[in-house]
Amino acid sequence: MREQFLSNCEKNFIKKIILEGHRLDGRNYDESRKLDICFGSEYGSCIVSIGETKVLAQVSCEVVQPKQIRPNEGILYINVEISPMAAPQFEANRQTDLTVYLNRLLEKCYKDSKCIDLESLCIVVEEKVWSLRVDLKILNHEGNLIECSSIATLVSLAHFKRPDVTRSGESVIIHTLAENDPIPTVLYHYPVCLTFAIFQNNVLISDPSYIEETVCTSTTEDGNTIGGLLVVGMNQYKEICLLNHTEAAIHNSNIVHRAIQSAAERSKSVVDLIKAEIIRDDNLRQKRTKINFSDIITTNHVQSLSMKDLKICLKNYNINDIKMEEDNSPTEILDDKQDIKPEKSKYDVVASLPQTAEIKAKEGASTWIEISSESDVDSS
Amino acid sequence: MVPERLQDFKLKPLKCELNFLSKSDGSAILSQGDTVVLASVNGPLDIKTTSQNIEKATLEVLFCSKEGKPSVADRFKENVIRNTCETAILGCLYPRTGITLTIQELENYGGLLTCAVNCACLALINSGVGMRHVVAAVSCAVNEVGDLVLEPTQQEAESARALLYFVFDSRDKNLVTGFTEGTFSEDTYEEALVRCRLASDFVFQFYRDVVKKYSNVI
């Protein structure tokens, strides 16, 4: 299926509210969605979600021959796959520009920044080295894939442990996980890619959602691009590992500075969270607690439009406040409404679920379109 | 004798969540014991004219394993799931369209294929695509002694003499798909078929419970 295009109306609305200081989901400019990490049963498997964007990462390893130019270094390979599961517009087994772009960004961030000690992956020089392969599967695309997949890569690499190896003369023995404790990967620093959407060269938005990303990279009616996406790769020491910018050019360097400052704060908090989660998981594993992806199946999240998923939020609208009012005097509110509006509207706003409301057409035939035969009779 | 027989019908604990993904028309995550599978359904949607069918909807199935490159084993699973689901979907309602079914393996501790079929069925129910019937997959192993083991674990499956997979429909409990690995006698096959058919009732009951739970909020 082709990608669904945004209408001019939607584009202009989003642009307008963002320039006025609002966002569709009620966040502030520098506020990110909730970051959630959960681990699978194997080492190096995790699902990272930012809001509703979900990415599955799995690290696997095998012994291979090293590259000729780097005989004493292991190999890191990153592979991103976007299946129709992420969104209907993606086709199966086809490389799109987005996959190539994501792959290259992640390679820049994790291979070229030399955050992994590749030399420690060497077993026999010029003969045997470990090759790590990170497989990323995009499960749900709700915007900011770059940040989500970069965190997933980092978490899975930090969580991964490879089997122990001993050398006896010419032969190399790879021990199973039960025989010898596996060895964790050595990471010198933890770089994270953070995405910012720039609107009209002055508004900086962190963690853009799908609709914000699309509006940002689209063109207006007069042919100008609204803004661009800026990716900042930064580690916990506030060192920049990667800068990438797409779409409209930036006129003032001030905005890049602001992005970097904002990224410095966020990268620190993300890395702290990742480290804390990995330590927590390690402690659970030492206590022989079973960790499995089945833990993410919960029953407290039944409805598709639950509070967590409510896509459009208003800043001054608190769901809990509204609930209270409704509980106290539901009849009064209804009476008030009727007093103010003696002329009844054709539609009723009915509270369907605790947090939502729906518009229902009133009973009876519509009086909107009146088919009158009188005029016909008159003319004839 | 009776308690033993009851034990034979034990299936692994099932756990399911619908609407796991926001972008898909229907999605389900299902765990059968320690095996976990995620499935998403999109459709009916427009597809390339070359793959359109003027009589019914084209079902495209994609099975993604957790790691490594796509393999022949994945293609085999796709084939089984496609053939099974094609009989279940009322494709004639949506001519010239495509329905895509994507299945992602999350954990594999044996019984991946049965879990994938059941999860695909739940995702199809969630997507609201018209269906003739729902399907339930049950697997069974013949161990070295010759006893039947329902829903074998990975170790049991590896040491088993034969593996038998059955998929039943919900209306008359007819066999929709059946395939086997290894050697076994004709009587064993018959007995395994009867036992799995009885066990499929539990899966259908589980579907009913899941749908009941979600139906009053969707």
Image (spheres, coloured by chain):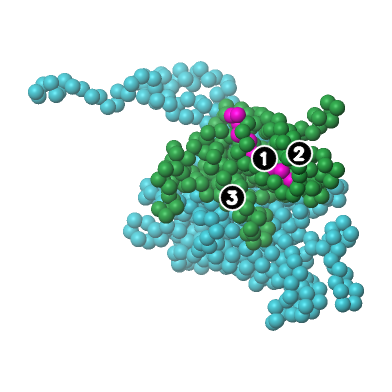
Chain colours: A cyan, B green
Q: Secondary structure at mark 2?
A: helix
What number is the disc on residue B166?
1
In percent of width and height, residue A63 lies at: 76, 69
Q: Residue furthest front?
A: B186
Q: Could you say which is closer to the camera, residue B72 or residue A96?
A: B72
Res A131 label: none
Question: Is residue A354 in sight in this rendering?
Answer: no
Q: Secondary structure at mark 1?
A: strand
In the image, A277: left or right of A139?
Answer: right
Q: Are marks 3 and 1 on the same chain?
A: yes
Check if mark 1's residue and mark 2's residue have beta carbons within 8 Å: no
Residue A125 falls inside the magenta stretch: no
Q: Main secondary structure of the magenta part?
A: strand
Residue at 71% from the left image edge and 43% from the top image edge? B164
Residue B22 drawn at (x, y percent): 55, 43
State the quadrant of the N terminus of chain B. top right
Q: Which residue is mark 2?
A: B188
Q: Residues within 10 Å of mark 2 (few under 14, many from 20)?
A: some
The magenta segment is B163-172
For the C terminus of chain B, give its image quadrant.
Answer: top right
